[in-house]
Amino acid sequence: MRTDIFARLDREPEPPKIEAPRMSRHRIALFGGTLAFYLAIVWAVLITSWLVALDWKVMLFRPYQQWPELHPFLDYYVVLGQRGPTAVMVACWLGWRSWRQHTLRPLLVLGTSLLLLNVTVGAVKLGLGRLGPHYATQIGSAEMFAGGDIFPSGHTANAVVTWGILAYLATTPRARRYLSAVSATVSLGVGLTTVYIGTHWLSDVLLGWAAGLLILLALPWFEPLIARTEAWIFAMRERWRERRGGAGPAPVADTGPQPVLLPQSMATDALTAEAVTAPAEPVLPAGHAATGVRARAHTGHPARPGSMPVAPAGVRRPPPHTERGPRAGSPARPMTGG
């Protein structure tokens, strides 16, 4: 029981899990309605319907000539829909969030959305090949399959995706509402600005809004793939750290302690003739005095000042000579007369 308690205390707390938006019925219905709107715009342009006629009316109206005072401001405002600047700004913000939350999900979601944007919008642009208003050749024509690349509007779709990602990754309902309003305002303004400048037809902008919204609505289907990618990246990082931590200088071979034999005079009944281990010392050349363990081994124990030499353990020391009489067994000295 005590071991289980300590095992629970030793466990590291798990990082908080961020729940990803799920594909609810409301989201699925919204995705289906947006897809139907997308296909309807493509079909209306292909058959040169009333939508194409509206495009020509707006283009011939030339809004940039009607309100020229707005042109300097809108030239800078349209940058909010360009891929490079917006992707860098949003990536910096999401990178800071990833560092604070110790997760790669915000950056991976942004990368997935931009990849989907390039594939889907780019494929439709190249497939339909519509020319822009400044390159139109025939009034009333849809200008399809003519080698252009402006249908749908990339600026508009990019504005919807890059700024909509902030609302998609919001952690509170209040922040999600505010960021959704901001992203909708920015993407709506960017789309209308391209119509004002004359770089896109009105139908291009409508299709760009639908294309960007479809990508945002489809992101929950890619959440399992994003989670697996994040787990794989973290696993590779741990392996790299283990390899980097294990790579170091080669260990020096330990030769172990070398045996040093005591001199024969120190061998006694209690001390058997077995080797006593001591750290090995280098062999000194001739003419140099021995130091360390070998010096003590060959010279014996130094005599203590003011006392008798210390004998090894287990050896009996003969009693000191006394002046009371001669030793037993020794011949007596003859007495001489004085």
Image: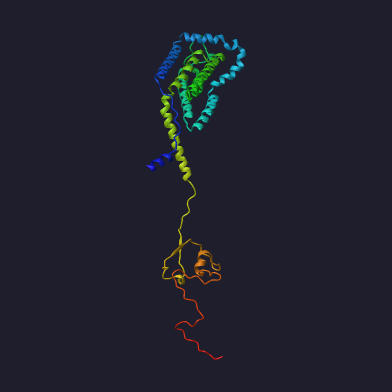
Residue name at image x 46 percent, y 19 percent:
213
Q: Residue at x 60, y 17 (%)?
A: 73
Quadrant that contains the N terminus: top left
Q: On screen, 11 above or below 90? A: below
Picture coordinates of residue 128 (x, y %)? Answer: 46, 17
Give the quadrant of residue 44.
top left
Left/right placement of residue 284 relative to residue 270 reads: right
Residue 118 vs residue 233, the one in the foreground: 233
- Measured from the top left, where is residue 333 in percent x and y? 50, 87
Could you tell me which residue is drawn at 41 percent across and 28 percent down?
A: 224
Q: Position of residue 86 (x, y in %)?
A: 54, 24
Q: Nearer the viewer, residue 126 or 7?
A: 7
Q: Nearer the viewer, residue 189 or 146?
A: 189
Residue 208 location (% of width, % of height):
48, 17
Single out the residue that lies furthest toward the bottom.
337
Image quadrant in which you'd find residue 225: top left
Question: Can residue 231 be seen in the rendering of this structure?
Answer: yes
Taking the view exactly as shown, the residue that stands out farthest to the front is 324
Q: Is residue 78 above or below residue 227?
A: above
Name the residue at 48% across, 44% down.
245
| Residue 161 seen in render | no
